[in-house]
Image: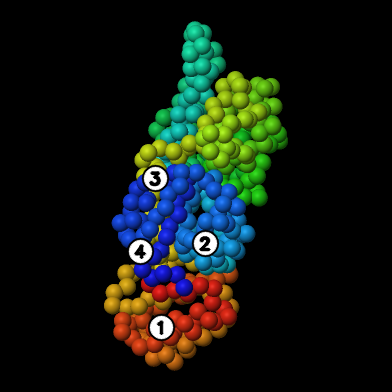
Amino acid sequence: MAPTSPAKIKILLLENIHPVAAQKLRSSGFEVQEESASLSEDDLLKILPQFHVLGIRSKTNITDKLLNANSHLLTIGAFCIGTNQVDTISANKKGIPVFNAPYSNTRSVAEMVIAQMISLSRNLGDRNMQTHQGKWNKSAVGCKEIRGKTLGIVGYGHIGSQLSVLSESLGLQVIYYDIIKKLPMGNAKPVESLQELLKHSDFVSLHVPETPQTINMMGAKEFSLMRKGAHIINASRGTVIDINALVENLKNHKLGGAAIDVFPSEPQSNSEIFKSPLQNLSNVILSPHIGGSTEEAQESIGHEVADSFIKFIMNGSTTWSVNFPNVDLPIHKNAIRLLNVHKNTPGVLKDINEIVASTGANISAQYLATDAEIGYIVMDLESGSHGAEEAFKRISQLKTSIKTRIV
């Protein structure tokens, strides 16, 4: 059983998560340990048993092996947008909700893409380097305004739609492609296929998650469809572009330039040397995965995920979890709240209610949500109700129960 007192719950935050998260969690009574770097699987296997909650960013991988060895974890937080670094399916089966921050760095990424479009269109990266080297290359050749050009956005989610609005205000025409039908913002127009988008775009900006379908979604065939002199920008996931194919199309001048913020393989710390075939190519802007790395975004992310931790640990709410039945719960007053995660099989709710009835505990409120694998039931038992502890004990012993706790 997990501790019911916040002071006994230990939280581990890795990868230089903004200090506002630790401050907020400590002010709620939790014990928090902060580490600046990511940890390897072996290191996590050694240290995680002493913690109840884990917070990471994008470099720490949470595998099925780790989760099997630490099924006691209450929750995991990804202090970023993506959660592909966490085996969310395995976490779901072990009753561990995973939270992220899907909105907090949206503006930061969108603004960086705007800056990259202008920089690529004006060759600012090369001009900056040449001027630092003492070369005075005052020429308009190959430099264009972005006004009147077409931006193709692949993935029209939170970032893609925000980018759409900002781009229109700069005079760009916006088209977009998404596998899910999305409502256009402003004058943006959806297209039927990725191929159609590539044929009509002067800039292509990628905003998709890492899935089996998106790995190497931009390869030699796709680059061949793009306009000569077009630019590509990737601030999503490093695996969505075939880097060798991109290099070839930059060297043969099919593409006019590229801005890449994410890579198939990235250093685990700032002290490691970064190497890429894209280095030293003309009009290529490379940045170290900093799309969402603004002070404003990181502070907002710290607040967002820390709030999710507090609401779940103290109240049982799972709103915005990426892998768990979502339940938005009211604050429980004058009640003992019993939380149970169980296998989603017929008859479980009947078994649980019969146990509560047999112990004499009185249910003042009950909430249930399910997905394909698990069910999540929350019961408020009247404070002072006899049998609450017995009900907890017997429910946690059911063969269908995965995790049971009282808050």
Q: Residue beneath label 4, please?
A: 7
Is disc 2 surrounded by few (<14), some (14 to 19) or many (20+) residues within 10 Å? few
Three-letter code, disc 2: Pro
Alpha carbon of mark 1 to alpha carbon of mark 4: how far?
21 Å
| Residue under label 2 | 49
Q: Tell me the mark number nearer the camera, choosing from 1 and 2.
A: 2
Specify the quadrant of the image occupied by residue 205.
top right
Q: Which amino acid does label 3 sit on?
A: His
Q: Mark 3 highlights which residue?
A: 18
* Residue type at tag 1: Glu
SS at badge 2:
helix
Q: Which of marks 4 and 2 is nearer the N terminus?
A: 4
Q: How crowded is mark 3: few (under 14 residues within 10 Å), some or many (20 or more)?
A: some
Q: In this view, does 258 lie to the left or right of 291?
A: right
Q: Is residue 84 left or right of residue 101?
A: right
For the residue marked with disc 4, what is the amino acid? Answer: Ala
Q: What element carries label 3?
A: loop
Q: Which tag, 4 or 3, sits closer to the chain's start?
A: 4
Residue at 42%, 49% (x, y): give it.
Answer: 34
Question: Which residue lies at the image location 48% right of the left edge and 61% below the top edge?
Answer: 50
- The disc, 3 or 2, on the residue closer to the chain's N-terminal end is 3
Q: Does residue 344 appear in the picture of this structure?
A: no
Q: Gap in Å between the C-alphas at discs 4 and 3?
A: 21 Å
Which of disc 3 and disc 1 is earlier in sequence? Answer: 3
- Mark closest to the chain's N terminus, 1 or 2: 2
